[in-house]
Amino acid sequence: ATLTSEKMLPLIAVVAALLAGLAGWWFLVGSKQQDKVAGGADAAGAPHKEEGGKKKKKGAAEPKPGLPPKKEKKDDKKEAKHPQQVCMFKGHSSDILQLRFSGTCKVAGTVAEDRRLIVWDLKSLPPAQLMNLPLELDHGVGCAFSPDDKFVAVAMGRSREVRIYKTKGAKEGIQMQFKTNHSHDILSLDWSFDGKFLVTFSDDPKDTIRIFKPTGESLGHINPGALVVYSCAVSPDSRFVSCATMQCDARIWEVGTGKDGYKLQGKAMELTGRSGGGGATGHIWG
């Protein structure tokens, strides 16, 4: 009996080895079938991650070896352009409050809420920037050029003062600065065609219009006596300052030399004849 059991031990070891090999083969076959099932899902369009964590889109063409992948084209939004548009003034980062051409039409100026004054060279189009000047602690609401284009005046929004700069002297800073004493916001600024005075226009009900020499010396102020004043203008001969009111009339004052020197002389005329509180008719006086 002892000999028989000793003879059976090698047989039992062979059977055990065969069973272990059969189990290992069965495990390998099962894992390969699972890989085939997963590969079929990818081929059917299931998204999978590429290197870097990016998802690959269904149907996306594989880049050829040795060539860079093609970039997807994006539709650039083109700005609408009028057929008669010549150029655009680009340089401000916020709303432009005024654009003013000089008397010679060689330069133009813009002021905006981004607290910058830009002087543009109009000799070539699109215009180049002659000066891009930051306005310290304030923003401009109006600008005007001297007759020779050498200086540009800026009416400030918060301080209600006037600053004068050289058109090509950003590094030289403010050349002249003076208070206007307006109690309300300044709406516009004009420089007379002869260069002798500046006119500030405000919605101040008492002193709507103020006139100054470029040095800051006051030449007088105008109270039109109207509830609402819409605009102010200087005549080309620099003799008259006018304003349009809601009372359907235009009132004109004279600036010139009198007994007291060069200053505001008083009201010269009043153009009436309109009716209807701002109707759609226009009048021309000669």
Image (tube, rainbow, N blue to C red):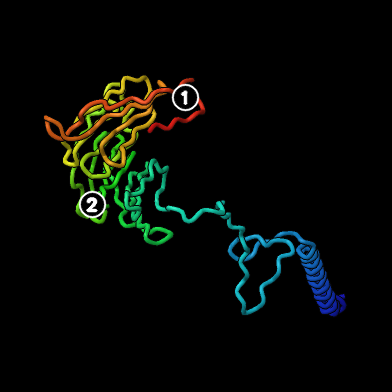
Q: Please tell me which residue lies in front, 136 or 193.
A: 193
Query: Could you tell whether 55 is left or right of 106 in the image?
Result: right
Q: Where is residue 42 in the image (x, y as percent from the top left)?
A: 76, 63
Q: Position of residue 198 (x, y in %)?
A: 24, 38
Q: Please tell me which residue lies in front, 154 or 236.
A: 236
Query: Can you see residue 150?
Result: yes
What residue sits 36% from the left and 46% below the top? 100
User: Circle 1 sits in a helix, a strand or a loop, which is it?
Assistant: loop
What residue sits 58% from the left and 54% below the top? 77
Marks 1 and 2 sit apart, C-alpha to C-alpha, by: 40 Å
Q: Where is residue 221 in the image (x, y as percent from the top left)?
A: 23, 27
* Amino acid marked by disc 2: Lys
Q: Earlier in the sequence, mark 1 or mark 2?
A: 2
Write down the quadrant of residue 253 in the picture. Answer: top left
| Number of the label disc, if any, that sits on residue 278 | 1
Tag 2 residue: 166
